[in-house]
Amino acid sequence: MTLDEHTTLAGRFVRSRVVFGPHETNLAVGRSLSDRHRAYYQRRAEGGAGIVVTEVASVLENDWPYERAPLASECGPGWQSIAAACAPYGTLVLAGLGHTGMQGSSAYSQSVLWGPSRVADPVTRELPMAMGQPEIDQLIAGFREASAMAIASEMDGVELDAGPRSILRQFLSGLTNTRQDRYGTDRVALVREIISAVCEVVGSDHVVSLRLSCDEEASWAGLTPDLAAGFARDLSPLLDLLVVVRGGLYSSEGYRPDFHCPPNFNLDLCREIKAAVSIPVVVQGSVVDIADAHAALEVAEFVEMTRAQIADPDLVVKAARGDRPRPCVLCNQTCLVRDPRNPVVTCVGNPSAGFETVDPDEREQISTPGAVLVVGGGPAGMEAARISAVAGHSVTLVESSSKFGGMIRTFARGDGRSRFALLAQWLEDECRRSGVTMRTGAAVEAQDLSDARSRGELIVFATGSAARPPTYPVDDSVRWLDASEAFGKLTTVGPGPVALIDPLGGPIAVALAEALAAEGVSVSIVTPDSIVGSRLGASGDLVGANTRIQQAGVTRVLASRVIEIASGVVCVEHAHTGERSQLECEVVIDCSHRLPNETLKEAADIQVGDSVAPRTVLESIREGRFAGFTTRTSFNSAERAIS
């Protein structure tokens, strides 16, 4: 079976076997689906998605899990717009419907949380009310009415959420359902009643899908594959499609984990559930590569590739013609957006994701091409060169080192982080495929820039960053390295002890600590925060990172700052008590912010990425992309000012 093989569900045409699953986007206006939603889903339909499931809409107003969470009663016009936009591509569009129950939030609704029983969410610690029959009746009616509205809005069907953060899963699980009535003795009863009510209003000519958590990874009371297989067998006669996922009360991060979890992790789970049912099944679980997708289709009828299609909306079309899609690196840094700052869903490698109504279409050609010189072959420079070349410009990309990729190649080491090298290689390959003239080991001098300007070339600077000198006294009794140097010398650092100084709380120090510990090096991390990797909560790796480094024997020096380093000792001061302590070390690795490389910057027409301010891969590629878009308008006049 190939990814682009078409099929039918409930008598409806489906153009491919690839699913774009439901996820938070923060694209809503109020609690309504917006035109940005329409453009976001339409772009994936254009690129070959067979099924699009829209962001889960709450079926009752009392469920408001995050500020921009859609509400079904306000989604009719949005659903209609999305359905109309995706229909010409043969893409089936399902309305995601759900209720988060005791895993929701009362911050926005100002209402008590609902739950099967009085069990608090371990994340928020908020205790819900135990639902009585009136609340259960409201919930059933909410799903029925939301489904009816979706069908009236020309959706192809609905997908009901019984996944890691859903009230339906809470009723199925012994972790959260300790009821003594029929909804406790028969834990599938409520889900069965809801699906039956939905089927009555949806009809046999529309799709009813269920997203079912089949392993909560809490075998003492939670959903296990055996239990889930029984539930799936019970419910499947009412369904057209079953999506197999994992995660629950204590393992919601297991639903869409980052690169520390191997891709295609749900394959065996899906195989077990598939054996219990006779309806089409969807494999979900970090399936982001074409080879893994084909392996998944040996087990199930469909494969969900949500993050892969955020990274490259044309994934299915490209796979069909033998092209290589932009890789998803599974970093979760910008596509998991349940965050009080309300960031819009996007991708570090494809910053136009989520901004389809804002950014130009990178595939557009221009009528007045010119010549562009890009200085610096990191992610910002390669993206600027690629976008400029696709537009039709003659582009030269020069890099002073021996290889392209910049910091993302440097930091693509350690468990799972090697996927970042895939993105660097894709950018390099696409630059070559687009006709960019590429040179390494090429130092650019002032005269080179002057000559380029005299030829009318547009000059883009993406010259990266340099190590920041230490901001504390340090003598020559220790070997001092910045993080980028350390990644290049992992096997030569020595036995230690090594002190990692991490004022940022990001992934770099954690990755270094893990890599060094794996080499047998004695490692300590000094952080001003009360936990190591404090910024990793957004990507879902905060707990995992601290678990891994503790298991690796890394010493954590928390809520502390470095005062000085002398005589082979790091002196640290506790942020709250002022108490000072000492760490013996032979090597110090500083993971602080780097500084921009500003050499010859006055010669640039456009400056991007770390050469402006060292930040993350997202900002580098986004600014490189903006530079490429800017070159489209820079040659429109007959002559460009040359100074």
Image (tube, grey):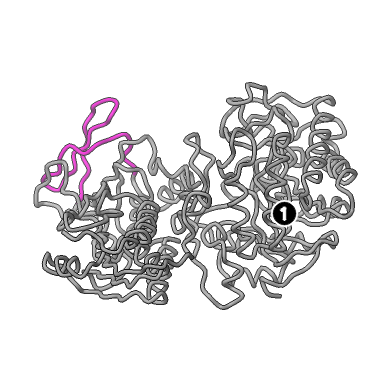
Residue sitting at x 39%, y 61% = 414
The residue wearing badge 1 is 93
Horizontal placement of 321 versus 385: left or right?
right
Quadrant holding the C terminus: bottom left
Which secondary structure class fits the magenta region best?
strand
Q: Reply yes or no: does residue 617 show up in magenta.
A: no
* Residue stretch in magenta: 556-585
Amino acid at dot 1: Val
Residue sitting at x 73%, y 64% = 271
Q: Is residue 75 above or below residue 293?
A: above
- Which residue extends farthest left? 476
Q: Please state the horizontal and vertical placement of residue 286, each as a whole percent of the image.
A: 58, 59
Q: Reply yes or no: does residue 581 show up in magenta.
A: yes
Quadrant holding the N terminus: bottom right
Residue sitting at x 30%, y 58% = 521
Instruction: Examine the image and state in which quarter residue 598 appears.
Output: bottom left
